[in-house]
Amino acid sequence: MKITIYVAYCIFLFFITTFSYLFIDPNFSYLHNLYSGFAFDYRLQTTILYLLVIFLFFIFYFLFLWLVYKKRLNGEYIRLLIFTTVGVLFFSYPAVLSYDIFNYIATGKVIFFYHENPYIVMPIEFAGDSVLAFTHAANKIALYGSSWILLTLIPYTAGFGNFLLILFSFKLFIVLFYFALSFLIWKISKNIFSVCLFALNPLVLIETLVSSHNDVIMMFFALFSFYLLMRKKNILLAIIFFILSVFIKYATFILIPVFLYVFWRTIRKKAVDWQKIFYFSALLMLGGFFLSPIREEIYPWYAIWFLSFTFLIPEKKFFLNISLAFSFSLLLRYIPYMLTGTYIGQTPILKELLSFTLPVLYSLYYVLKKKI
C-alpha cells in the first residue's frame, strides 16, 4: 500500500510540474520554446485542471495525515515524501500563480548589478533591461525589508549573470529555508504529525516550492529566535534573528510583545508555557493576515505566517481546523482571475467569497455544535 501511494504521489507531482509550464509568460524569452499559450487561450480547461490539482493535493495530504495519526507511517517515510516533493516541484515553473520571484530578481539586479538603491530606484527606470518584459511590478521600489535585500545577494550572485540560473538559485535558496523551517518544527515539537501538517501542506508547498515566496524565510528566523530562547542559550543571537525576521517583510513586527515577554521570562530564569506562546503567536499572525488588506490585499501565501505556529499546537482543534480550511480555500482564490483573465468586475468579490466561505462555515458549525 505504501509503495502504491508513493508511486501515485510521484506521478501527481510530475503532473503538477508539467502543468506549471502551461503558464509560461509569452514575454518570457528565456523559455520561449516551451511557450504554448494554453493557460491564456483555454482558461476554462486550465481552471478545471487547476481545481483537479488542488483537490488531489488535499486528498494526498489528508491521507498522509491520517496514516501518520494512525502511526502507519514513520518518520523515514515522511522524509522520503518531503525530499521527493522538493525534488520534483523544484523544477516547476515559478510564475504560475504569482510573479514575485521575478520581482525579487529585478530588485536584486537594481542593487547588485546597477549598484543603485532599490528603495529609491525602480527596475523600470533601466529602460531596455530584458527582465522588464515579464516583471509585473517593475514600477515599484523595493517592497521588502533590508534583511531580504541583503540575503538576495546569495542567490543572485550564485546565478553568475545567467537569468535561468539566477531564477533557480532563488528557488533553491527558498527551498533550503523550507527544509530549515520544517526541521525546526520537528526540533521544537518532536512530533512527526506537526512536521507532516506543515511540510506536506499543499498551500505551503505551492506557495514555497512552486511560487517561491520568501515567507518561509521570515518565519524561520522568527521561530528560530523563539527556539533559542526555549533552549535558554544565545539570547543575543535570538534577538538578532528576530530582527532579521522583522526586516524580511515586516509582518513579524506584530510578534514583538510575545517576544519581549518570553525574553523577560528567560533572563529572569522563569518558566515559559510554550504552548500558550505558540498559540498567542499564531493568533497575532492570524491578525496580521487579516490586516494585510490595509497594505494591498490578502494573498494566499500570507497564511504561512500563522500556519508555522498553528501546526506546532495541533491539539488546539478549532484553530487547527480553521488553518486547514484556510489552506484549502485560499488556493481557490486564484480561480476567478484564472478563469476570466481580469482583476476587475466580479473577480474581487469572488476571490473573497472563495477565500472565506469555508472557514466561516466551519466557525459557524463549531459555535452551533458547542451550543447544542
Image (spheres, rainbow, N blue to C red):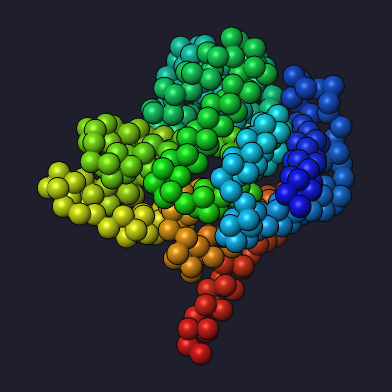
How far from the left and from the top, in percent, is residue 287?
A: 41, 58
Residue at (50%, 62%) from the top-left corner? Answer: 320
Considering depth in this image, is 168 or 74 the residue closer to the camera?
A: 74
Q: In which quarter of the image is residue 240?
A: top left
- Taking the image as shown, residue 272 lies to the left or right of residue 164, namely left
| 290 to 229, vertically: above or below | below
- Taking the image as shown, residue 69 lies to the left or right of residue 274, namely right
- Taking the image as shown, residue 282 lies to the left or right of residue 234, namely right
Residue at (52%, 84%) from the top-left corner? Answer: 368
Residue at (48%, 14%) from the top-left corner? Answer: 112
Considering depth in this image, is 45 or 258 the residue closer to the camera?
A: 258
Residue at (44%, 24%) from the top-left corner? Answer: 151
Which residue is the extreme one toward the bottom?
372
How far from the left and from the top, in percent, is residue 47?
A: 80, 51
Q: How many labels does the image show?
A: 0
Residue 190 showing in the rendered view: yes
Residue 9 showing in the rendered view: no
Considering depth in this image, is 274 or 104 the residue closer to the camera?
A: 274
How far from the left and from the top, in percent, is residue 23?
A: 77, 36
How far from the left and from the top, in percent, is residue 185?
A: 45, 45
